Every structure is written in C-alpha cells, then in structure tokens.
Image: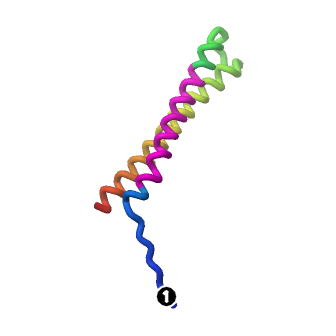
Amino acid sequence: MAVKTVTVSNERSERDVVPLVKLMTIAAWALLGIGLVLSLLSLDHFSDRNAMLMIGIGFMVGSVFVYVIRTAIHLVHSRAVSKDE
C-alpha cells in the first residue's frame, strides 16, 4: 500500500484567502450602506412595528457579523502563514 503526501505552498493558500477577505469586506460595507439607507428612509415612524426600519437595523447588525467573520478568517490565515515560516 502506497502512501501519498501532498504539500501545499504558502503562496497558494494566501491567494485563496485574499479574494474572500476582499469580497467579505465589500459585502459588509454594502450591507451597512443598505441598512443605513433603509433606516434613514423610514425614520419618521420610529417603532418596532416599522418593518423597513427593523430590516435596516438587521442589515446593519448583519454587516457587523460579516466583518467580524472576515476578520477572524484573516487572522487565522495570517497566523497559520506566520507559523509555517
């Protein structure tokens, strides 16, 4: 029975993560912008029954989560790369 080993270079793994980090950054800012626009358009009736306001706040909270996940992916990847060197 033969054993195969696979080596992965650091350069390849960095190229795989950088576009994801950039995409998630753009998505987080886009979600924040959509949330701000929706919230500002429906600010006249400030109530929990105002669906557009609640959706806007949800977009803003979601953008924070996307940015936190993006930051975690970036930090884990940078730590793995520094550990390999």
In the image, residue 11 above or below residue 63: below
Give how far across and how far down residue 41 sits, in percent: 63, 13
Asked which secondary structure carries label 1, the reply is loop
> What residue sits 56% from the left and 20% below the top?
36
Indicate whether 55 appears above or below 82.
Answer: above
Write the start and end of the magenta stretch as one range: 14-36
Instruction: Report x, y in % for residue 60.
Output: 55, 28
Please state if 82 lies on the left or on the right of 14 as rendered: left
> Which residue is farthest left?
85
Query: Which quadrant of the structure image shows residue 44?
Result: top right
- Residue shown at 46%/50% (left/top)? 17
Identify the image quadrant of the C terminus.
bottom left
Residue 31, image quadrant: top right
Confirm whether the magenta stretch covers residue 39. Answer: no
Residue most toward the top? 44
- The relative height of residue 62 versus residue 72 in the rendered view (above or below) is above
Disc 1 crowd rating (10 Å Cα; few below 14, some 14-19, many 20+) is: few
Instruction: Using the image as rendered, state which of residue 72 and residue 4 is in the foreground.
Output: 4
Residue where numbered disc 1 is placed = 2
Q: Position of residue 8 (x, y in %)?
A: 42, 66
Q: Main secondary structure of the magenta part?
A: helix
Q: Is residue 20 magenta?
A: yes
**Scheme of image coloration:** rainbow
Q: Nearer the viewer, residue 46 or 84?
A: 84
Amino acid type of the residue that numbered disc 1 sits on in the rendered structure? Ala
Identity of the residue drawn at 51% across and 40% down: 24
State how many labels appear: 1
Q: In this view, does 33 lie to the left or right of 7?
A: right
Instruction: Name the one closer to the observer, 15 or 50.
Output: 15
